[in-house]
Amino acid sequence: MDEIVSDLRAVAQDDGSLHSIAALIYRDWVLNIDLAEAKVTNDPAQRWSTEKLNNNELMLLLGLAVQSSSERVWSNLPSDDQFASKVDKLLREMHDRINADAPWMDPETGAFSERPEVIGNIAREAIYYGADGFYLHQFREMARRRYRSDQEWMLRNVGISIRPIVDIATFICDLITQQMDYAGQRKALGLLETGELFNSLLISKASLQKRFGNKVDAFLAKFSTSAVNANLDFIDPFRVNLVGIAPLIDIGEFIFVPSQHKLFQSIYESPFYWMMGDKAYRQTASTHRGRFLEATSTHLLKRVFGAKHVHQNVTLYQGKNIAGEIDALIVYGEFLIVGQAKSKRVSLKARAGDKEALENDFKGALQDPYEQALSCAELIAQGARCVTDDGRALEFPTLPRLFPMVILSDHFPAAVQLSRMLLKRFDEMPPVIWDIGFLDCITRILVSPIEVTFYLQTRSQHFDKVVSDSEFNFLGYHIRSKLALPENVDWMMLERDFATVVDDFMIAADLKIKAQRPLGVLEQLDIPVISELFAVLKNSDPELAGVVIDLYDFSGAALADLSATIQDMREEVRETGKALKAFSIQTSTGGLTYVVADKRGADTARSAELLGAMHKYETKSDRWYVIIDTIETDLPVDGLLPLIWKWAEDEDEATRSKKVASMFKSRQEAVIVGAAAARREEGKNSRD
């Protein structure tokens, strides 16, 4: 590894290396956007290629380049065009060397490696080469809120508060984007002049000072690194790289801007560490950081679930004693999402592969809040009294469906992969582990409580069966196909191109382009009766959310069969004058009885309830839902009834079920999925 780094340093300090790095930036980071469609138009293979440099590799090159004692790294032009090929070869060798120390698979069994001695090295590779988390605009918008309460300290100790920091960075990035757009157009036309790519990434200090005055000095003191004789302690890819913290490169009268994303990432992350260096202010800074995370998390969740369903800082009591605390609790019908927020980042030692440091970081950031969420969920199930921060006692449904959620203030690289190796599950439901960047994204794309809750359920169900290096990949796959395994597939790996639809939407926001959110496959569903049914149920009483979630779990073929069956029953009731016709099906959590009746009324409602209760008891289910559909209205739903209680053997209930079965001539039939829809289509064709 030392030899590879030494060779990289030599290449990174060649004459004109910053010019060559600028060319690499255009090769690997520049995206072409269709402004009308708000979509990236680059070739997908190139866009998602793992051969491209990632942010850590770019920072590695820059971190080595600024160690040079000569201004020739930027004042001279490259002597040849071999820089990119040399860098690609050396970085490939470095990745191969890291991989050799980090065997993901056991060579003998082919299973995921569980050898404790390699976990640190596996994590080192996964973290260094893992997908990024936040998008640029998220860093920009959240940084303001994160440090809003620290304004006085920042002015006193840094000479600038967070608002002008963000304003200066936004000005820099907007100007650089304009210059890169112009240079990119000239490049496409073959009109580039020597040094033009490098120049497009420069901004003059004079232009900054003219607009922002002496605040620029304080800004550059924290976010810029000298282009020469700097970062000399950086001798290993896994040590502190000052360029990653201060990613603007100072070349005298100008600033070289190699990564807008890294600049805003530093603005979001670095001020906290400045404050932690002040022992007198350390606790205050930590308190502000925690409050920001809790407030932001609940704000984002309210965006979807509504304020009355989201509660911040809930205290659980057993008797008079405090038994637990929940940072964010969502109560939506029978669904309870228990969210625990954590402000914990991956330490440098863990990033370098130190197993003990990694396990400590993982425990503090993920394991502890997961166990806390599980503990609070169990207390709720046992009947603990829950009180909001304003003193209101919360009431919960019978048999709540509970989901543990861990919410992080910072991106935890490789959290998905590491959870497979390190998370202690106790045979309980696995958590969703989301940073607030992803939480912001998902609450903008899945905009209804039903959509988010269903995604939570499927993400949890397939925690062990579907793997990837980014939550954005899971979401992209879900939007396209539902997060479900194809038939006869037991395990699946999602590559980064699955995130395309999400990435397009978020990049548009980076560029301040208003884009239509991507619609999921379930939102685009067009099946007679079923589409109308979903539209009504999604906006009905939250108590009925469970039936929608259960139906969402059905395949398209199964939903088409339901549609055909309901239409057939409607026609039969209309033509024969029958009082009602019904069918019942089992779902993953219980079942559903669908009743088509000739008219509304108490008798219809009572009959439907008896039928549903009969099937609930006979199938020993804790949950059963009843839908009433009368032909005297055009509404897809005329009545809804959830039957939710713990099943228990009961002689009276058994007797009642037998009477109901006899009264309604209930019978069981084996059904082949697709048969009803095919039969109806065949009948339609014969009539035509």
Image (tube, helix red, strand yellow):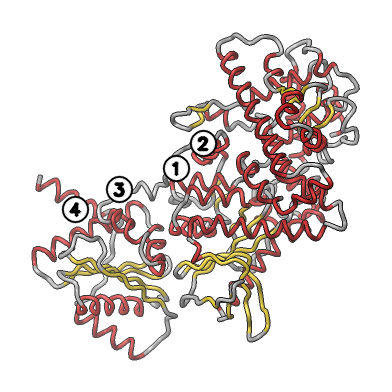
What residue did someone put label 1 on?
518
Q: Is residue 119 left or right of residue 480?
A: right
In this view, the mark in front (3 or 1): 1
Q: Amino acid at mark 4?
A: Arg
Q: Position of residue 273 (x, y in %)?
A: 80, 49
In this view, the mark in front (1 or 4): 1
Residue 480 sits in which quadrant? top left
Q: Are marks 4 and 3 in contact (CB under 8 Å)?
A: no
On screen, 190 above or below 314? above
In this view, the mark in front (3 or 2): 2
What residue did someone put label 4 on?
680
Distance Cα–Cα, label 3 vs label 1:
17 Å
Q: Position of residue 556 (x, y in %)?
A: 34, 51
Distance Cα–Cα, label 1 vs label 4:
33 Å
Q: Are marks 1 and 4 in contact (CB under 8 Å)?
A: no
Q: In this rendering, does residue 583 appear at all?
A: no
Q: Are marks 4 and 2 in contact (CB under 8 Å)?
A: no
